[in-house]
Image (cartoon, grey):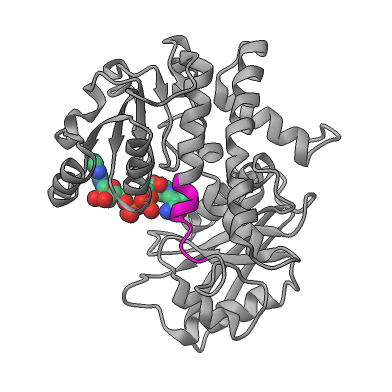
Amino acid sequence: MAVFSMRDFDGHEQIIFASDPETGLRAIIAIHDTSRGPALGGCRMWDYASEDLAVEDALRLSRGMTYKNALADLPFGGGKSVIIGNARTAKTPGLMAAMGRAVDRLAGRYIIAEDVGTSVDDMAVIRGVTRHVAGLRDGSGDPSPATARGVFVGIKAAVQHRLRRNSLDGLRVSVQGLGHVGWELCRQLAAEGARLSVSDIRTEAVERAVVSFGATPVEAERIFDVDADVFAPCALGAVIDDGTLPRLRAAIVAGSANNQLAEARHGAELARRGILYAPDFVINGGGVINISHEAGANGYDRAAAFAHVDRIHDILLDIFKRADAEGVPTNLAADRIAEERFRPSGIS
Ligand code: NAD
């Protein structure tokens, strides 16, 4: 495995291969950059088809956290961990405790939190063996309301910049995915008078949104064709691709889903078509901002955490202005701003 030449290696500070034969733990902890503070990032448990894919995923996610944390202006660097295995069949308290011991050996250089395949209950087990853990039930709790709040203020910023409007009253928003984040986002948008079109593969969620928010139901496949001001992807990644891009009729793409662009070049293509894209790793930063307040020195204070989440509004405005000034797509402008914050010397 040629780790140093992998695409997302990108100067990773440290990569740890942790194992515990007794519990079957095989994990990778990737620490990309700690120049802003300890690396903060979730722990993913996934049945990777190969060890190479697990390493690749850890590096990609860890590097992404450096950018995300820097843009959210957090005193934390970027890191991520992956446990190789099926979260439904191979996860045991013993395995999670072994993971916690691996984290503890790093003495605070990496702070673990939940991600796909791990839960608040797993973090509680880890808390039994290390204090370098965040996202506990009696701490910041479920990150989704904070994420939804960040997307909500992010949509406001995008509407202000692209449509020169301060009010959401009558704004047409199409929302893909009515899960934890999408539902809460719809609630906030509807409360400010937005007109919603919604899709989900769970038809009962769509029916509830029709009743609760007066939303217009849309078949899952047709959500890209809706004539809306804002398209908010809150379900899957890679939804902006060569097939969906020409179908979009919205002036703005702003939602919570991770990795919305199938490829970075799709960011340029959105810009070319005059569609303002709110980079996903900025607009969906509310969850990590919320968790970071638990990991900080002063303990968790919900009001302070949510006030910080609201700063996503101004962070996005800065990105939009920079993109305009430099004539680059917003995803690239965001990358540049992040890099100035964790690589102030410009060395890469
Ligand atoms: P969730 O699993 O609660 O909700 C996802 C919803 O999307 C479900 O209702 C699902 O039925 C629906 N869905 C799946 N495929 C669909 C399709 N083809 N068309 C329409 N709907 C579809 O997840 P969530 O926590 O609400 O997160 C939503 C997205 O935001 C994910 O991409 C997640 O990675 C990202 N995100 C979430 C958080 C958070 O705090 N929860 C933070 C950052 C990013």
Question: Quarter-wise, where is residue 211 in the image?
Answer: top left
Is residue 265 visible from the viewing direction of this image? no
Q: In this rendering, would 7 be left or right of 343?
A: left
Which residue is rendered at x = 32% and y = 23% of the image? 170
Identify whether 139 is placed above or below 319: below
- Apparent side of residue 318 relative to residue 28 in the rendered image (left or right): right
Which residue is outermost to the right?
Answer: 345
Asked if residue 133 lies in the magenta stretch, the reply is no
Considering only vertical position in the picture, is 309 above or below 232? below
Camera-side residue: 135 or 148? Answer: 148
Give the quadrant of residue 257.
Answer: top left
Q: Give the residue drawn at x 80%, y 50%.
A: 35
**Horizontally, is 67 left or right of 267 in the view?**
right
**Secondary structure mainly formed by the magenta segment:** helix
| Nearest to the observer: residue 206 or residue 347 | 206
Residue 131 in view: yes
Left or right of 119, for residue 220: left
Residue 132: x and y in percent read 67, 72
What residue span does the magenta drawing correspond to?
Answer: 141-148
Does the stretch in magenta take in 147?
Answer: yes
Q: Quadrant of the C terminus?
A: top right
On the image, which quarter does residue 255 sit in?
A: top left
Whole-percent x, y for residue 142 in the image: 46, 62
Q: Position of residue 65 (x, y in %)?
A: 61, 49
